[in-house]
Image (cartoon, helix red, strand yellow):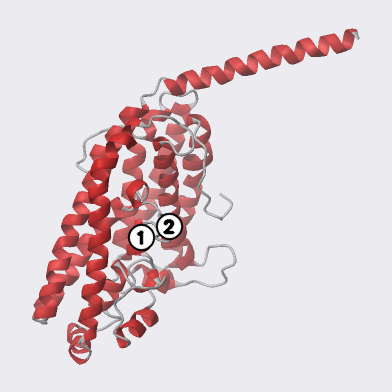
Amino acid sequence: MKNKAQLLIVIGILFIFSCKEKDKGMDASLAFDRGALLSSITSGMIMPAYDSSVFYFSNLAQTTLQLSQNPNADKLLQAQQNWKQFARSWQYAAAFNFGPAAEKGIKKTLAEEIASFPVSSTKVESFILANDTSFANFDRDSRGIFAIEYLLFGENESANDILAKFANQPQRFSYLLACSNHIGLNLKWVQTEWKTYQASFVSNVGTDIGSSTSLLYNEFLKYYEGLKNFKFGIPLGRRPGQTTTLPKNVEAYYSGYSTELAREHWRCAQLIWEGTGLDGKQGIGFKAYLDKVEGGKALIALTQEQAAATQAKFDALPTGKLSDAIQNNFTKVDDVHTELQKLTRFYKSDLSSLIGIAVTFSSGDGD
């Protein structure tokens, strides 16, 4: 009986100590102003990102219409350049694929609806041949940003070759303009809805699943994993079950603009963590959150060290097409994926543990 009583006393002491430590962590987390984080990200990144994407898409839509009305090499080149500008701006809006951009019923997220890749050229050509611009299907890899890219850039084709295709098959322009209209309607709707949604987003300062901080954090993870797994992992043949590389599965294969877009994606992820706005002004990000919790400063140092190592590998990427680099300079591209993989734990398990927000997103690769 005496031993049992002593055991109960020990357990009681441990329980009290455990509660105190938990309370200490909760107090540190409560000391951080999540409303300020949400407000900073909304005004510094989310709204500017959607506004920028709508602006650059409007330019693209205008030039594609002009191209259809008067096809020539100059107008094709302008449309191609505007496509690149829009694709760059989209990398930032794509990071906030929740709220108005979230999945609703049979409608997928905005990113899935307008930016699924790799595009299926076979499906695109099939719908063009059938003169079907209804999009009454679930073939999201046959429309959107990368369907437009395929039509404007072709595969290793000259401007004359691309224009000849449009001339010989006028319904190509119908499909091009239908894709443009589809993107414009979806993108503009989300931008407009965010103007109303932002107030409730900023005021929802809890940490439970469904809270704004949880949505922001989990979408940040999903966005980061998308860079690692889909823009590098799959083309490199590094995903579970893969036995070979798939260079054509890079983002923006037809324009050869994959490396540039991957760099923008990486930059955006860093801005969110740092809390820097698109205008370069310092705001509040997850780094500031970490600074307020026990053990946070140490994790900040480790994260920044690994981020610097990752940046160095991005800087070392060969110029030219990423798909070519995978075939001809595999190690340089694989090095980026390796460093991204190392950084995952700091963003995922370690950050989640210290700020007390559950990871609800799973990449399916065991990280």
Q: In the image, 59: left or right of 320?
A: left
Q: In the image, 147: left or right of 9?
A: left
Front: mark 1 or 2 = 2
Which residue of the protein is positioned furthest toward the bottom in this rendering? 168
Residue receiving disc 2: 105
Q: Amino acid at mark 1?
A: Leu
What secondary structure is found at the residue carrying circle 2? loop
Which residue of the protein is positioned furthest toward the right in this rendering? 1
What secondary structure is found at the residue carrying circle 1? loop
Above or below 73: residue 116: above
Decide which of 182, 141 is in the foreground and name it. Answer: 182
Q: Residues within 10 Å of mark 2 (few under 14, many from 20)?
A: few
Q: Position of residue 201 (x, y in %)?
A: 33, 37
Q: Position of residue 275 (x, y in %)?
A: 31, 36
Q: Amino acid at mark 2?
A: Gly
Residue receiving disc 1: 317
Q: Earlier in the sequence, mark 1 or mark 2?
A: 2
Q: Is residue 166 visible?
A: yes
Name the residue located 27 percent from the left edge and 34 percent from the top edge: 40
Decide which of 140, 269 is in the foreground and name it. Answer: 140
How many numbered markers are drawn? 2
Q: CA distance from mark 1 to mark 2?
A: 40 Å
Q: Position of residue 282 (x, y in %)?
A: 25, 33
Q: Position of residue 68 (x, y in %)?
A: 14, 79
Name the quadrant of the N terminus: top right
Name the residue located 38 percent from the left edge and 65 percent from the top edge: 116
Name the residue located 25 percent from the left edge and 54 percent from the top edge: 189
